[in-house]
C-alpha cells in the first residue's frame, strides 16, 4: 500500500501538468493591433522611415511585398550599414503588431 500512494501522487501531478499544457495550447493568440504597431513604429522606426513611413534615411515602407517572416528577420537582424538590428528588442506580439500596422500602409 505504501508504494501505491507515491505512484498515485506522481501520476496525478503528471496528469495535471499535461492537462494544463494542453489547455494553454487552446488559448487564442494574443490580440495584435495596428494601433499598437503604429505606436511602436513612432517610437522606434519613424526617425529613419519618416513619421508617415514614406522614407527618410530608411526606405518607404508602403506597399511592402515582403512576407511577415522577411519583415521579422529584417527587424531582428537589420542590414549592415543600412538598418539597425533590433535583435530581441521586440516581443513576437510586438513584431506582429508592427507588421499589422505596416500592412495598413497603402
Image (tube, rainbow, N blue to C red):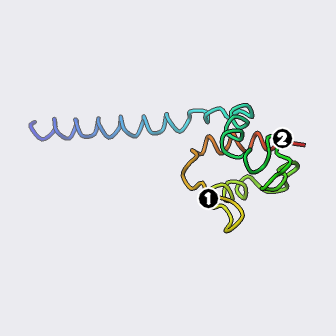
**Residue 78 position in % (x across, y down):** 66, 61
Classify 89 as above or below 38.
Answer: below
The answer to which quarter of the image holds residue 39 is top right
Q: Residue furthest bottom?
A: 80
Depth check: give the residue in front, 63 or 21: 63
The answer to which quarter of the image holds residue 103 is top right
Question: Residue, x 72% and y 46% (percent of image)?
Answer: 47
Residue 94 appears left or right of 10: right
Quadrant where the N terminus is found in the figure: top left
Name the element at disc 2.
loop
Depth check: give the residue in front, 62 or 26: 62
The answer to which quarter of the image holds residue 106 is top right
Query: Circle 2 is placed at which residue position?
Result: 52
Name the element at disc 1.
loop
Give residue 21's mark. Answer: none
Q: Earlier in the sequence, mark 2 or mark 1?
A: 2
Query: Circle 1 is placed at which residue position?
Result: 85
The alpha-carbon separation of the residues under discs 2 and 1 comes to: 21 Å
Count of all numbered marks drawn on residues in the image: 2
Amino acid at each position: 500500500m505504501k508504494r501505491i500512494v507515491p505512484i498515485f501522487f506522481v501520476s496525478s501531478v503528471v496528469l495535471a501538468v499535461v492537462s494544463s499544457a494542453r489547455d494553454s495550447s487552446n488559448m487564442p493568440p494574443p490580440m495584435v493591433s495596428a494601433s499598437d504597431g503604429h505606436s511602436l513604429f513612432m517610437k522606434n522606426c519613424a526617425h529613419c522611415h519618416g513619421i508617415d513611413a514614406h522614407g527618410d534615411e530608411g526606405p518607404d515602407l508602403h506597399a511592402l511585398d515582403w512576407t511577415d517572416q522577411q519583415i521579422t528577420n529584417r527587424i531582428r537582424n537589420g542590414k549592415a550599414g543600412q538598418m539597425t538590428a533590433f535583435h530581441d528588442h521586440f516581443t513576437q506580439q510586438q513584431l506582429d503588431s508592427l507588421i499589422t500596422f505596416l500592412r495598413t500602409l497603402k
